[in-house]
Amino acid sequence: MASAHSDASAESQSSSFYAELPNRHKTPPKTTAATSTMPLKNITSKSTPSPFDGVPEVPETLLAELQADISECVVGPIGIGGFSTFFPEVPGTSTTPSEEQITAFTDLPGKLSNMEDETLMYEPLVDAFNTLSSTFTFYDTHTRPYAIFDGQEIKPDLMGFKEEHTQTMLEVKIHNSSDPFDDDDPTSFVRSAQEARHTLGQITSYATCHQACQFRTHVFSFLILPTYLRILRWDRSGVLVSKKLSFEKITTVVLLLRFVAATLTQLGHDNSLTSKIDLSSAKKDEIRDELGLDAKAHLAKIYIKKR
């Protein structure tokens, strides 16, 4: 790195370095009532040209490559107790589900199992997930691209937001045959059927994009079927996959409550790096010049602990 700068506000055992900041993905300030669509900023109507117009969705060939790459790096099925360790209880939060929350999820199989169109599943799922927390909000995003990543359009079915940033992506499938994983096969947890391979490539593309667009040590995502869900933890080494978690079990709702109550660090945000820099405009321009960056380049501050 070309430039180093001591930060008086940081602990004495750390140094601060500056680097160019990639684009961040945010939601606008939260509305008073969560709806089934996400009011993203800078999203134009369908009658207006959009920066995403003409951008292809992820092609089958790339999904196949992603599926092949990740298949050797999958660990599972992991029980609910194992996944609970990622979300230790946060002081001041409750992980005891209310009757409303229990009913919202235990009713889902009856609502989702008879649907003939996957898109009809989104609204009841969003409604159920939005009973979990007033500060972690879920939206139907299937018609609105999250990003253009590696020249491809990334468009998860649902997304969850906390503190104005994307925290999780949820992929919904109407048929159990789309599940890439088989809890009951002792020889191979990763399924080889074409439909299953497609799903695995798809959710891998979302997790890869999510980690590339934010400062992350890991991310969590969800795979949702009519009667159950899986939670997945992704990092640069691979993915940990939960066993099937039935919507009808209270333990599933408890795990979801622990997830939405988790701190940003527990959710995977890298707290060694921040875009909040307390420097004058002149000092920022000086850093950009020294690093050879464009005059409008965003800066990020990286904390490096001294040994």
Image: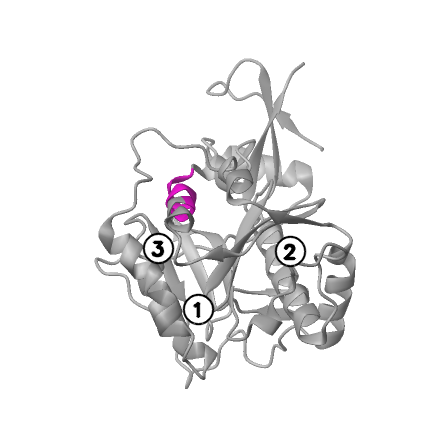
Q: Main secondary structure of the magenta part?
A: helix
Q: Are marks 2 and 1 in contact (CB under 8 Å)?
A: no
The three-letter amino acid code for the residue at tag 2 is: Thr
Label 1 packing within 10 angstroms: few (<14), some (14-19), many (20+) = many
Q: Are marks 3 and 2 in contact (CB under 8 Å)?
A: no
Which range is magenta? 255-262
Disc 3 is placed on an element classified as strand
The three-letter amino acid code for the residue at tag 1 is: Thr
**Viewer-proximal residue, 171 or 1?**
171
CA gap, disc 3 to disc 2? 22 Å
Which residue is most to the bottom?
47
- Res 4 label: none
Disc 1 is placed on an element classified as loop
**Residue 254 in view of the camera:** yes
Residue at the disc numbered 3: 137
CA gap, disc 3 to disc 1? 12 Å
Is residue 121 magenta-colored?
Answer: no
CA gap, disc 2 to disc 1? 18 Å
Residue at the disc numbered 2: 208
- Res 141 label: 1
Label 2 packing within 10 angstroms: few (<14), some (14-19), many (20+) = some
Q: Are marks 3 and 1 in contact (CB under 8 Å)?
A: no
Q: Is residue 91 above or below residue 176?
A: above
Classify residue 289 as left or right of residue 254: right
Disc 2 is placed on an element classified as helix
Classify residue 184 as left or right of residue 167: right
The three-letter amino acid code for the residue at tag 3 is: Thr
Classify the position of the N terminus by image quarter: top right
Classify the position of the C terminus by image quarter: top right
